[in-house]
């Protein structure tokens, strides 16, 4: 039955959702902690990739108190492979904040949720609607795409004004009687039906879709060219001596903050990298080239890397570079590290054996 004042767009989406919704664990709960955790995992991540992480993390940290009490190394290790580690860091920070400042209870309005670290408009709207029934529309790439196509909106979605415009439209469409269902429906519709390669031929909105009518499905939404990807060159030197390897934790505001890696020099040229550190050039007679992990692609960067294994005699002396430390080779396994290094280790048996101790 049609609800009073429900827009036909919302009504069609909700009907479609009843028949097409995937059974996902975070849809079976109204627990704001679980919903929040799933939303953070799913940022920039496909559902199939995120699901095992959801199970791992909810098993390790069933409540916000468990997550707040976790040590960062354990969390990073569980997060390993999911990328965008700032999400894990913010997750931890927010869990602590909720425990310390809110006695473990999530705020129950969009306005308060958005004040939490790492919680943007999309996540705040998702928690507010799914956990607390507030009529706050979620607006992400999927929603931009559906609304731009269905209503024929030409606004560049990368333009600063786009979020305001699309959110205002979604706010008009979201039914106060069932905001959670509408939000889930529009997200699911964007993933399964009005996807980047949409299935217009069997779409329930096809008779009223402006983009389909005007033959502009492939032109909408309008998206100006994104910034070109930055290309970076990382040279790794795995310095091993007497059963220990030299490592450091990435600290500065950059990719992989908080993760561990071997001695690394960023420089376009390998020669420049080696010559910049006299202690390193002196070690090169002991260096053995490793199979390169190749080009590692991140959202806005490409990392081109190579790697050398340097096994030093036990009597070899040198001053440790700043911020680096020795650990037992076998301890490296337990540290959170970038996927690039996991690939490097997997591809080089000699290195794997050294790190297995
Ligand atoms: S007809 Fe095509 S473009 Fe329009 S809403 Fe449906 S799937 Fe999207």
Image (cartoon, rainbow, N blue to C red):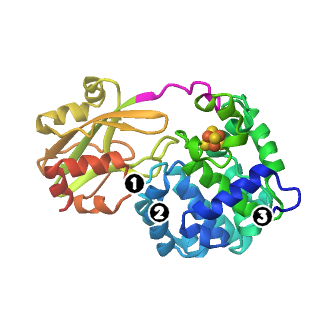
Which residue position is annotated with label 3?
Answer: 178
Residue that extends furthest to the right in the rendered view of this protein: 4
Q: Residue visible at 69% across and 47% down?
A: 139
Q: Position of residue 316 (x, y in %)?
A: 15, 45
Which of pointers 3 and 2 lies earlier in the amino acid sequence? 2
- State left or right for residue 315 relative to residue 245: left
Which residue position is annotated with label 2?
Answer: 51
Which residue position is annotated with label 1?
Answer: 81
User: Is label 2 in a helix, a strand or a loop?
Assistant: helix
Q: Position of residue 145 (x, y in %)?
A: 64, 39
Front residue of this view, candidates 100 and 141: 141
Q: Position of residue 71 (x, y in %)?
A: 48, 67
Q: Are marks 3 and 1 in contact (CB under 8 Å)?
A: no
Q: Residue visible at 88% across and 56% down?
A: 5
User: Is label 1 in a helix, a strand or a loop?
Assistant: loop
User: Is label 3 in a helix, a strand or a loop?
Assistant: loop
Report the Cα–Cα distance between label 3 and label 2: 26 Å
336 w.r.t. 154: above or below? below
Confirm whether residue 293 shows in the render. Answer: yes
- State left or right for residue 212 relative to residue 41: right
Badge 1: residue crowd in 10 Å (few <14, some 14–19, many ≥20): some
């Amino acid at each position: 039955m049609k609800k009073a004042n429900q827009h036909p767009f919302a009504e069609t989406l909700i009907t479609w959702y009843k028949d097409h919704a995937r059974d996902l664990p975070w849809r079976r709960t109204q627990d704001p902690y679980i919903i929040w955790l799933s939303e953070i995992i799913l940022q920039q991540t496909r559902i199939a990739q995120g699901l095992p992480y959801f199970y791992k993390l909810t098993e390790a940290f069933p409540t916000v108190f468990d997550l707040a009490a976790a040590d960062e190394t354990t969390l990073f290790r569980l997060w390993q492979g999911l990328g965008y580690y700032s999400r894990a860091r913010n997750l931890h920070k927010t869990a602590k904040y909720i425990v310390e400042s809110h006695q473990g209870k999530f705020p129950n309005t969009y306005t308060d949720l958005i004040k939490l670290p790492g919680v943007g408009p999309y996540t705040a709207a998702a928690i507010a609607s799914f956990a607390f029934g507030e009529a706050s529309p979620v607006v992400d790439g999927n929603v931009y795409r559906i609304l731009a196509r269905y209503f024929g909106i030409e606004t560049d979605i990368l333009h600063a004004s786009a979020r305001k415009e699309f959110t205002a439209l979604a706010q008009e469409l979201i039914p106060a009687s069932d905001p959670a269902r509408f939000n889930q429906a529009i997200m699911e519709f964007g993933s399964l039906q009005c996807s980047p390669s949409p299935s217009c031929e069997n779409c329930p909105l096809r008779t009223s879709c402006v983009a389909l009518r005007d033959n502009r499905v492939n032109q909408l939404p309008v998206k100006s060219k994104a910034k070109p990807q930055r290309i970076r060159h990382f040279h790794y030197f795995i310095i091993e001596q007497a059963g220990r390897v030299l490592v450091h934790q990435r600290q500065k505001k950059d990719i992989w903050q908080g993760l561990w890696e071997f001695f690394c020099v960023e420089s376009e040229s390998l020669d420049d990298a080696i010559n910049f550190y006299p202690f390193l050039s002196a070690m090169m007679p002991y260096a053995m080239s490793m199979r390169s992990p190749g080009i590692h692609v991140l959202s806005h960067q490409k990392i081109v890397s190579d790697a050398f294994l340097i096994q030093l005699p036990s009597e070899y002396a040198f001053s440790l570079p700043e911020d680096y430390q020795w650990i037992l080779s076998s301890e490296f396994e337990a540290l959170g590290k970038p996927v690039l290094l996991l690939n490097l280790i997997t591809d080089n048996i000699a290195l794997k054996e050294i790190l297995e101790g």
